[in-house]
Image: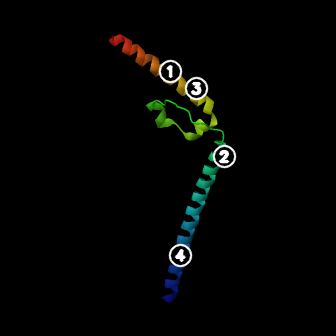
Amino acid sequence: MENSHDIILIIVIGAIILLQIYVFINNYIKIRNYKNTIKMAKEFEIVEVTVPDEWIKDLEVEDILKDPVGFQNSSSEFHEKIKSSSSSEFDDYQ
């Protein structure tokens, strides 16, 4: 009976160690990806962008980092469109 107790204890300890290794590897990968993202962002600058609500649902940071100029142009065009439509609506009320 004592042998089976030891075997169960070893299995439980082994499972805990495997779980800790799994969590460590996942966290290590996340940290490495975060560091790589920072390296890619060295030349970024803060700019004002207007992001439509529809875009936020499907927008991924990687998409912006892959083509920051294209994203800025798209959002600038959207911002200009919003400004022109809101000013024309304002003119309608006057």
Give the residue number, with chain letter if any, for mark 3: 73
Q: Quadrant of the C terminus?
A: top left
Q: Residue furthest left?
A: 93
> Closer to the camera: disc 3 or disc 4?
3
Q: How many marks?
A: 4
- Residue type at mark 3? Asn
For the point 45% across and 20% down, the residue is 83
Q: Assess disc 3: are there few (<14), some (14-19) or many (≥20) residues with their C-alpha within 10 Å of its C-alpha.
A: few
For the point 66% across and 43% down, the residue is 40
Q: Upstream in the sequence, badge 3 or badge 4?
A: 4
From the top left corner, tell me how far across and down residue 51 is, in percent. 48, 31
C-alpha span from label 2 to label 3 = 23 Å
Q: Is residue 84 above or below residue 44?
A: above
For the point 52% across and 31% down, the residue is 49
C-alpha span from label 3 to label 4 = 55 Å
Q: Mark on residue 13?
A: 4
From the top left corner, tell me how far across and down residue 48 is, in percent. 52, 31
Give the side of residue 32 with respect to residue 88, left or right: right
- Residue type at mark 1? Glu
| Helix, strand or loop under label 2 | helix
The front one of 91 and 65 is 91
Give the residue number, with chain letter if any, for mark 2: 39
C-alpha span from label 1 to label 3 = 10 Å
| Helix, strand or loop under label 4 | helix
